[in-house]
Amino acid sequence: MTATTRFLDLADPSFNVTSDVVHDARDDSWFAETPYGWAVLRYEEGTALLKDRRFRQGNAQWPDQNGIHDGPWREWWQQTLLSIEGDDHLRLRKLLGPAFRMKTIEAMRPRFQSLANELIDGFAGRGTVEFVSEFAEPYSSRILCFLLGLPDEEWPQVAHWADDLGKSFGINVRQDLPRIEAALEGLTGYIEEVIADRQAQPRDDLVSTLIAAHEGSDALNRRELSVALVFLAFAGMETTRNQLGLAVQTFLKHPDQWKLMAERPELGSRAVEEVMRVAPTVTWVTREAIEDVDLNGLQIPAGGIVQVLSHATGTDPRAMAEHARFDITYDDRPLHSGFGGGVHHCLGHFVARTDMSVALPLLAQRMPDVAADGPGEWLPVSGNTGPVRFPLRFTPEQ
């Protein structure tokens, strides 16, 4: 490390990846060092890296980076869509892809609207809400249950497992491992029961579709099927729940934009992109070098890990120019990295984009003067972040 290379302690729970410390490091250089390899801080270099075929996803090393070298969670993690590469990765995405196409998800928009209004009805007359437990979690969980064909009334148990399993993405993963492995066992057992039920009685749902693929020539084996469904169940819920909380937190700092979105709900889609640019729940995107790489003069050996810091690249003034401020009307902004990039671009991004673009304008219309009702409780702003508790207050609906 040269004298001028900054060190950013991403493993410290008190470290904030959106802080001035990171911005200052970005001013000095396009990269810094971290406990998890190098960090890319600027938009141009980060965007290029995510498309660079000399790198692969890199998440497979996450357990080892945290001192977890065996056990059921590590074994499962190595088999998820995030960790596998090459032909197996492409085959799994091909089988899952039809359920997540834009046309398929867009047809669900009325159902998302109905669910959002139903949940808001539950607290609109009260003037207070604990946003995570009363909106973000049931909204994302019930949508996920609908997508997978799971009973709507079982969403609280699925959400509980998904919440604990979501700690897999946190920087406290080693301390949280007992809860993570208990959730993995519970959710896997539940999904195995669902698979057995759909084998006996197929339905028009994703599980039945994947079972049919499992029995075809381009087959998923039973373990791949179980791992894929467990991963979808927790990743789809956890990230959307967190991102909705971060969205409201961001709009509280920009009340003029909240008011505008209420007046022009068609801006909901742009609002999602802006929130994910400045306040992404996925605070870094991992890549691993598959060969020795000279990256703009930085020598990265084969196996070296690089983290693209989502907020730092998304707010890089070199790329955003005069439009760096939060603005949901701006429609020509460079793409953010909140959904990753390259062959590992998030499979469920249409789901997340659609359900959030539905929810946010409805929330703005029905809670126009929303404000924080205390500090709440938040995950570290490093790793995957978001609210644990987020109390809000507003003028009750009459």
Image: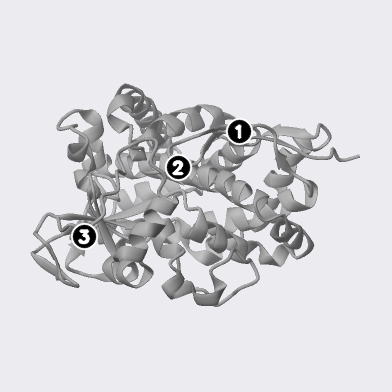
Task: Check if mark 2's residue and mark 1's residue have beta carbons within 8 Å.
Answer: no
How crowded is the residue under tag 2: few (<14 C-alpha within 10 Å), some, or many (20+)?
many
Taking 42 as reference, is 250 left or right? right
The reply to whether residue 217 is in sight is no
Quadrant in which the N terminus is drawn: bottom left
Residue under the point 37% across and 49% down: 210
Viewer-nearest residue: 353 or 287: 287
Which mark's residue is nearer the viewer, 2 or 1?
A: 1
The image shows residue 88, relative to residue 51, as above or below, that is above
Viewer-nearest residue: 303 or 254: 254
**Place of residue 222 in the rendered image (x, y in percent of width and height, measured from the top left):** 26, 40
Instruction: Kindly report the distance in space between the C-alpha atoms of the residues bearing marks 2 and 1.
Output: 15 Å
Taking 55 as reference, is 274 left or right? right
Specify the amino acid type for callout 2.
Answer: Thr
Residue 375's mark?
1
The image shows residue 149, relative to residue 286, as above or below, that is above
Residue 56's mark?
3
In this figure, which residue is indicated by the disc labeled 2?
A: 385
User: What secondary structure is marked by label 1?
Assistant: loop
**Place of residue 86 in the rendered image (x, y in percent of width and height, measured from the top left):** 19, 60
Taking 276 as reference, is 48 left or right? left
Specify the amino acid type for callout 3.
Answer: Arg
Taking 141 as reference, is 343 left or right? left
Which mark's residue is nearer the viewer, 3 or 2?
A: 2
Question: Which comes before the other along the chain, label 3 or label 2?
Answer: 3
The image shows residue 121, relative to residue 291, as above or below, that is above
Viewer-nearest residue: 58 or 158: 58
Q: Quadrant of residue 78?
A: top left
Residue under the point 43% across and 61% down: 98
Residue 153's mark?
none
Residue at far front of view? 3
Viewer-nearest residue: 113 or 376: 376
